[in-house]
């Protein structure tokens, strides 16, 4: 599955992009972009944005849900929900690896199963949802599709 099947991924994540280029960019690894014959954006900048948004949403939920927790306890709990292992597992469950656009070398090294690639692409997807919509839509995506009652705020 690749570009033509992004509709399947959108159904899985419960969000339909108005700007499909943002979705494609969020799934484009730099190795794919570098091998393309045309200039292509890749997901690292979206990953940066998505990481910040994810940290904010998790911090906000923890703050609202745990009135008596100290700053240290809130920080400890946030780190559980934003670490690469947790995010890679969520990306794997959403099937994101099937949609990653990877360079030939990255494909040979099983890049679609690489935990770092999976976590990074999920963060990039968060950034893309935000830019395509607003904070309420990205909050819903994060809480419903990433944390979906598995994470105790």
Image: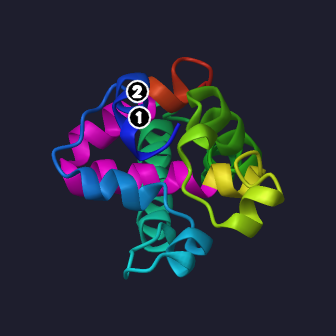
Confirm whether residue 153 shows in the render.
Answer: no
Residue holding disc 1? 5
Residue 83, placed above or below residue 41: above
Instruction: Residue at 63% x, 42% y: name it.
Output: 97
Q: Nearer the viewer, mark 2 or mark 1?
A: 1
Left or right for 25, reference 81: left
Direction from residue 1 to residue 130 in the image, left or right: left
Q: Please identify the dominant SS of the magenta region.
A: helix
Q: Is residue 119 left or right of residue 6?
A: right
Which quadrant is the C terminus positioned in?
top right
Give the residue at x 51% y 54%. 123
- Residue 133, compared with residue 142, is above or below; it is below
| Label 2 Cα neighbours within 10 Å, binned few <14 / some 14-19 / many ≥20 | some
Queried whether the magenta region covers residue 105, the answer comes back as no
- What's drawn in magenta, residue-wise? 120-143
Q: Quadrant of residue 101?
A: bottom right
- State yes or no: discs 2 and 1 in contact (Cβ < 8 Å): yes
| Rendered residue at 48%/75% (across/down) | 36
């Amino acid at each position: 599955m690749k570009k033509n099947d992004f509709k399947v991924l959108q159904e899985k994540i419960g969000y339909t992009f108005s700007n499909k280029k943002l979705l494609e960019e969020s799934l484009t690894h730099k190795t794919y972009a570098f091998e393309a014959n045309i200039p292509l954006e890749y997901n690292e900048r979206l990953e940066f944005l998505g990481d910040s948004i994810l940290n904010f949403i998790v911090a906000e939920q923890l703050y609202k849900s745990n009135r008596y927790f100290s700053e240290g306890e809130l920080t400890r709990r946030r780190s559980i929900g934003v670490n690469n292992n947790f995010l890679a597992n969520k990306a794997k469950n959403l099937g994101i690896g099937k949609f990653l656009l990877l360079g030939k070398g990255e494909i040979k090294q099983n890049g679609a199963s690489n935990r770092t690639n999976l976590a990074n692409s999920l963060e990039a997807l968060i950034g893309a949802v935000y830019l395509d919509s607003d904070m309420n839509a990205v909050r819903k995506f994060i809480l419903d599709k990433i944390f979906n009652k598995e994470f105790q705020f």
